[in-house]
Image: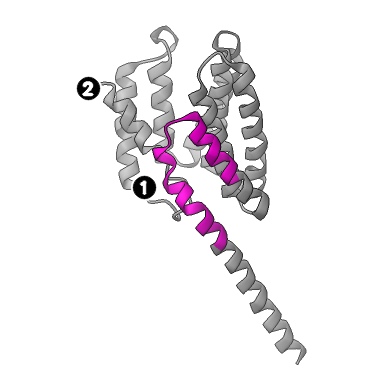
């Protein structure tokens, strides 16, 4: 009888956990699907707040923390350069959220990709005085992401952005950037996300940059 009770309890626990997971997926999938259509800093702030609420409710899932971090970074990047009073707090918030995501999912290339983006955001706030610190930090993070999964389309996207924006005297190269954006788009076509809420953003960014060469 005790074994039967234990078995029933175990099944009940599994059912409850699955129901909670389904609830999280349903809450996230519409937001995730719409990320590539966001075109304003405020739009990303709204997404960040939505993911933050899900993360606070779930606490044991890495994806809500990851997306909340990503959304804060994107909001900051769209705010513009040389505005540390506005963008540094967003970088701080993204970093804190990403730490939680990494605690739950260590060694994930998507987390290193957002680390690279946080470095870009901090550098954007004051490029002249910060590039020596955050440039190498970002390169290291992106290198780790590439080592884990060189076929990740977001790796090529960020490499392309670096080549696109960096002056030629410091290693920038528009021709190489174009090839990287083409590579990113090709990899998006070849890559299938692990689920409907796993990272799939970035295609419209790659398409935007490639269009700058036409």
**Most common secondary structure along the magenta stretch:** helix
Q: Is residue 90 above or below residue 22?
A: above
Residue 212, percent from left and from top: 29, 22
Residue 122, percent from left and from top: 59, 21
How many neighbours does mark 1 have within 10 angstroms: few (below 14), some (14-19), or many (20 or more)? few
Q: In the figure, is residue 101 to the left or right of 150?
A: right
Q: Residue at x 32, y 46 (%)?
A: 190
Q: In the figure, is residue 14 to the left or right of 71?
A: right
Q: Which residue is farthest bottom? A: 1
How many neighbours does mark 2 have within 10 angstroms: few (below 14), some (14-19), or many (20 or more)? few
Say whether residue 167 is magenta: no
Which type of secondary structure does the marked residue at label 1 adopt?
loop
The residue singled out by tag 1 in the image is: 191
Q: In the figure, is residue 161 to the left or right of 91?
A: left
Q: Residue at x 62, y 39 (%)?
A: 98
Q: Which residue is farthest left? A: 214
| Front disc: 1 or 2 | 2
Q: What is the number of the mark on residue 214? A: 2
> In the rendered structure, which segment of residues is drawn in magenta?
23-51
Q: Is residue 166 above or below residue 151?
A: above
Q: Quadrant of the C terminus?
A: top left
Q: Residue at x 42, y 38 (%)?
A: 150
Dots 1 and 2: beta carbons under 8 Å? no
Whether residue 59 is visible here, answered yes or no, is no
Residue 69, percent from left and from top: 58, 37
Residue 28, percent from left and from top: 51, 52
Q: Quadrant of residue 18?
A: bottom right
Total residue callouts? 2
Q: What is the number of the mark on residue 107? A: none
Give the mark nearer the N terminus: 1 vs 2: 1
Q: In the figure, is residue 179 to the left or right of 116?
A: left
């Amino acid at each position: 009888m005790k074994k039967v009770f234990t078995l029933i309890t175990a099944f009940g626990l599994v059912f409850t956990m699955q129901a909670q997971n389904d609830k999280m997926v349903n809450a996230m999938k519409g937001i995730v699907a719409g990320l590539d259509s966001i075109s304003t800093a405020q739009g990303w702030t709204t997404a960040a707040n939505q993911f933050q609420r899900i993360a606070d409710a779930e606490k044991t899932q890495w994806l809500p923390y990851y997306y909340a971090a990503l959304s804060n970074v994107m909001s900051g990047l769209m705010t513009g350069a040389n505005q540390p009073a506005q963008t540094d707090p967003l970088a701080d918030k993204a970093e804190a959220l990403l730490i939680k995501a990494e605690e739950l999912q260590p060694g994930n290339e998507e987390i290193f990709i957002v680390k690279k983006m946080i470095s870009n955001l901090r550098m954007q706030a004051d490029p002249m005085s910060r590039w020596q610190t955050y440039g190498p930090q970002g390169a290291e993070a992106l290198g780790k992401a590439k080592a884990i999964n060189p076929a990740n389309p977001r790796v090529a996207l960020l490499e392309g952005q670096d080549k696109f924006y960096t002056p030629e005297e410091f290693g920038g190269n528009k021709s190489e950037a174009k090839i990287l954006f083409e590579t990113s788009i090709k990899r998006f076509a070849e890559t299938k996300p692990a689920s409907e809420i796993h990272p799939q953003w970035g295609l419209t960014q790659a398409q935007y940059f490639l269009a700058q060469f036409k």
